Amino acid sequence: MNRNTTAAAGTLAALAAVVLRLATGPPHLGWYLAAWALFAAALWQAARLPERRTAVLVLAGGITLAATGLAAPPSSSTDSFRYAWDGRVQAAGISPYDHPPADPALAGLRDDWLFPAACDAPALWPLPGGGCTRINRPTEPTIYPPVAQGYFLLVHWLSPDGVRHKALQLGGFAAAVAVLAILCRAAGARRAAYWAWCPAVPVEAVNNAHVDMLGVLLLVLAFTAVRGRGALLGAAVAAKLLPVTALPGALSGVLSGGPGGGVAWRRVLGVVVPAGLVIALSYLPYVLVSGASVAGYLPGYLKEERYDGPGGGNRYAVLRLLVPDGWAPWAAVALLVLVVLAVLRYGDAGRPWRGALLVSGSLLLLFTPGYSWYALLVVALAALDGRWEWLGVALAGAVAYTAGPAAPGTPGTPAYAVAALAVLAGWAVRRSRGDHLLSSARKD
């Protein structure tokens, strides 16, 4: 092992130690920043290594880092408790969209883990009739779509008694390693390192066991599989909704006219029809049981997060630095529509992940959500495309969440602003080199 390899391995060991601290302790901004600094240093060191040595470090380092997320219960999110509850409710033959966890009708499904007798521990939510639960928003129905619900039910069926959070963490670990293997094969070890060593993967995909990881896996499979892209994209959307931002990428260049002119309808139908069928079929059993209730808490969530009003909370934070607060929501929607149209007109059909990255990353920069796990999708797409500058979106999300997604004056706003500047700087540098953000081959 030469000096460069030793240095990179040492940096990864330090990164694993810091990530372990993040997984076993309460969230702390300083530890997050230290982890991301080590991540950047590891990427810089790996760029100086031969491809073969890089591949070994990427695989070994990625698996080790992901495993650190298994070392402790969820450290900074309670979402996995809702996953476990939804799986339990379905196993009892009840739709998770019909009753919130606090409903007395489900009292027979409660246990001491999700509904502890003592309510003096942190991160517990009060119940209207007395008592408490680990499940967040217990008076609201579930928000998660049907493929995610199928996953929760499967994990419940496969889990031995007393496994608690560990089964969901193991599912996140398996999915994260699967994405790593796919990226190594499809994009090469150097690009796969963006995913393998990113602190968001062990923290959010494994330790906090966010179901976003399932959507990311399905999306990466969609863009790397030979067939079934539309169906896999539909399954990804029905797992966590946010992958809908990848659909324009799958349709990159359909408005370019092509040799025969007009819209490439065959490509459009080849993606949209199977995607729509998978989404519809996955929702159908729940619609038959629950009707319109399958929307769950989604409308309430959008209102709670202040996406529905001008200048609400910390949403649209970057745009609100440039335009009046009341204009920000409309500006965000208008700019996102322009990005989608640009991908459909100028996108490279041979690299659909590039357009997907542009749309999904732009959405996060424009709407500035306060939850770091939303950017797992962007990290995977950045690895596929090799555009490291988009990784700052994931860091900004981590800063916003750790500081408090609803806290006034949060450092998430400058973090998102810096991330946006990094993307623009990357675009300018690559354009000067002839590597265009959409298609490097097509010129009008």
Image: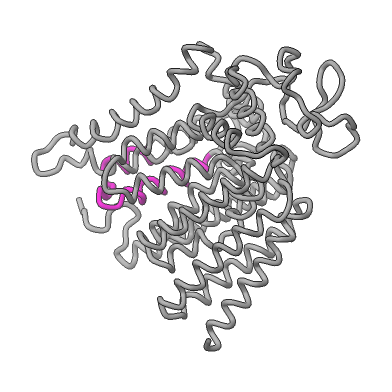
Where is residue 86? Give x, y as percent. 62, 27
Where is residue 313? Give x, y as percent. 67, 33
Where is residue 356? Give x, y as percent. 38, 45
Q: Does the segment drawn in magenta span residue 364? A: yes
Left or right of 128 on screen, residue 254: left
Which residue is located at x 49 percent, y 34 percent?
239
Residue 244 against residue 438 in the figure, above or below: above
Q: Does the segment drawn in magenta span residue 268? A: no
Which residue is located at x 50 percent, y 68 percent?
58
Q: Nearer the viewer, residue 312 or 216?
A: 216
Q: Main secondary structure of the magenta part?
A: helix
Quarter holding residue 188? bottom left
Residue 38 against residue 97 in the figure, above or below: below
Color style of the picture: one colour
Q: Which of 192 and 64 is in front in this view?
A: 64
Which residue is located at x 65 percent, y 16 percent?
99
Residue 279 against residue 181 in the figure, above or below: above
Left or right of 231 on screen, residue 115: right
Quarter holding residue 437? bottom left
Magenta stretch bounds:
338-366
Residue at the extreme left: 260
Is residue 331 something that shows in the picture? no
Left or right of 112 on screen, residue 311: left
Label count reads 0
Is residue 398 something that shows in the picture? yes
Where is residue 19? Give x, y as percent. 68, 61
Residue at the extreme bottom: 2
